[in-house]
Image (cartoon, grey):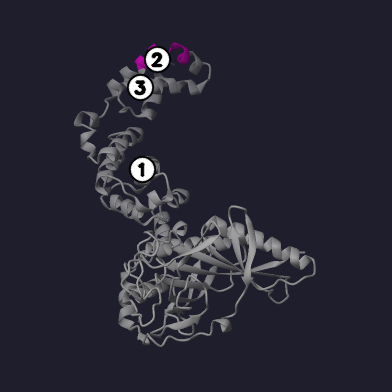
Amino acid sequence: MSYQLVCGIETHIELATKTKIFCGCTTQFGGEPNTHCCPVCTGQPGSLPILNRSVIEYAVRAGLAVHCDINNNSHMDRKNYVYPDLPKAYQISQFDEPVCVNGYVELDSGKKIRIERIHIEEDAGKLVHDGGYTYVDYNRGGVPLIEIVSMADIETPQEAREYAEKLQLIMRNVGVSDCKMQEGSMRCDVNISLHEKGEPWGTRTEIKNINSLSNIVRAMELEMERQEDILDSGEKVIQSTMRYDANSDTVYVLRTKENADDYRYFPEPDILRFYISPEMVEGIRASLPELPDAKLKRYLEMGLPENNARLIYKYKNVTAFFDGAVNEGASAGNVLNMIIGPIFATLQTEEDKENFEIKTTSSQLAALVKLIDEKKIRANKAKEVLAQMLESGKDVTEYVKEDDLAGLSDDDLRVLCQGAIDANPKAVEDIKNGKDKAINVMFGYVMKNSRGKADVKKAEAVIRELIK
């Protein structure tokens, strides 16, 4: 039987603050277990939380980046549940007055995935299961989070992946978080239900803590198959919290799902209500950088091929480098080719590209690219030079001298072409017999002996003239 998917995603993103949401402990990733915590973030009796102003500013920044309205009046709530990673037996979160509401993320198709809310909360600790024992590391406890809750507008696993990827790009671009899913600074809970067309929505299940974009797709596919089998057999899907195990490629039930009533939300008595002024909101709005989709649109308007532009637009540091070189007067197309060619060849991972730590500056690249633009050196020669510049950090003038920039006269080109003909009689015969590819042998001779200065099109015309 054919079923329709209804899906919404809750995305937890760790904010890039230096300290935790209610105390002065560091938010730095890693460290020995239980060394980044204090009485406040471990919930010791008598300790009192103090709300970090930067957390509110980051949440507003995130909300504006995805077109949300900002609630000027807000407060924190207690979400009550007992679990070992939450020592005080409740989480300080938000319930009825989140910081941000009514936003959206637009997919490449033009479809908008609506965002119901973005609220701030504290992260829990981490459980480590080893050798039959369970250990608790509270370093992550109290790290500030935003939870971005989408509406159930997602209709395919591919839409879910694109939505999550666009969220990741936007949040990185505006500096809210590094969104490293492998380190847990972005985690997705995917809610899924199936129903027959025209029938009411089915019972949903929630797959918790998915930590990669590809795993979102695979976990959804498996859960959809599981629910289809249940419905086809005439049984009912039970509302549950699920887990996807990438090692075994399976989804399994963790526990039956709690409802909001089970958490017994009530206003947090230890933290006062807070006010977000319109002036603060507009100040943050004015500080937002160009967003990724707008950047991609601008690159396409510059005439860049879309496939190539997509290779750089999602990396904040790469696009800053690209824009810097273009602003120095270098042609956009040649700058892009140098980035996705020689430069990306030295950056092996996504994280390398995100960090973009290279020795060559955008001004140095611009100086090199201008030589290509002015036809003073060939693109292949420029790539060789750039490889040396990337290794040393030196300017192009260290590798390209005035003599190298001197053009090749027509007389000199004719002499080289005659030399190529004399040195390759078989190729000459092949060309006369209609085997045009044989002329490549001639080009190799001409380019080598001109040290890359020769114009290939001119050389072809001269060679064909000489062998008639």
The magenta stretch spans residue 427: yes
Q: How many marks?
A: 3
Question: Whole-percent x and y of residue 377?
Answer: 29, 34
Disc 1 marks which amino acid? Ile
- Quarter of the image with the N terminus is bottom right
Residue at x-position 71% and y-position 71%: 237
Can residue 96 be seen by looking at this rendering?
yes
Q: Earlier in the sequence, mark 3 or mark 1?
A: 1
Quarter of the rendering containing residue 413: top left
**Segment colored magenta:** 418-428
In-front residue for pair 91/346: 91
Quadrant position of the C terminus in the picture? top left
Q: Earlier in the sequence, mark 2 or mark 1?
A: 1
**Residue at 47% from the left image edge and 59% from the top image edge:** 181
In this rendering, the label closer to the viewer, 2 or 3:
3
Q: Amino acid at mark 3?
A: Val
Is disc 2 surrounded by few (<14), some (14 to 19) or many (20+) residues within 10 Å?
many
Residue 242, image x and y in percent? 61, 66
Residue in the image at 55% along x and 67% along y: 189
- Return the residue at label 2: 421
For label 3, the residue is: 446
